Amino acid sequence: MNIIKVDLDSSEIISLIISESNKDVAKRFGLTIENCPKHPSFCTIKWVAADFEMGADYFLFEDNGIYKGCVAFEKAEENTAYLNRLSVLPDFRRFGIGEKLVDHIISYAKKFRVEKISIGIIAANIELKKWYNKLGFDEKETVKLTHLPFDVTYMIYNIK
């Protein structure tokens, strides 16, 4: 098993992993291309390419030649980074892949002297919120964004 940093050439596999990994979330929360066109379940190669253009670093989780998940890192401010697009294909969930990808981003962030990592999740996704809590993320605030059909909870991981 390897977590490898990839480049723009991997945009197709990244977009596939993101979209496939988030379809069950879209279904669960009633998200469609019409009411939430920016939801990761509708991710395209162009989205990933735009992320790379904005300076995001992407990592793929590979095991025996099979890509099972991905995550993106974006340095937002001097002391803050974003953990984005954490995605694990449904058949490979509950094997610790997501946790390994999060740990990788935390270690990676330390190289940039980042003090905190921020994420945003669907506020009603209680299971995901508990999972991130277990990994050391603290809930900060929940907000209503007018362009989204759900509230967003922001969580922070403080790097020690």
Image: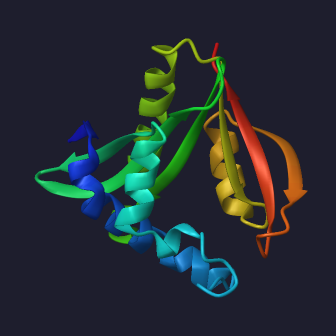
Quadrant in the rendering for residue 124: bottom right
Front position in the image: 18 or 69: 18
Estimate the x, y position of residue 17 in percent, counting from the top left.
35, 64
Estimate the x, y position of residue 152 in percent, counting from the top left.
78, 58
Estimate the x, y position of residue 65 in percent, counting from the top left.
11, 53
Left or right, 147 with respect to 38, comes to: right
The answer to whether any part of residue 54 appears in the image is yes
Estimate the x, y position of residue 117 in percent, counting from the top left.
63, 31
Tell me the quadrant of the picture where the N terminus can be found. top left
The residue sitting at 49% across, 75% down in the picture is: 42
Quadrant in the rendering for residue 137: top right
Front position in the image: 90 or 149: 149
The answer to whether any part of residue 95 appears in the image is no
Left or right, 124 with respect to 67, comes to: right
As drawn, which residue projects farthest toward the left? 65
Residue 75 sits above or below residue 149 on the image? above
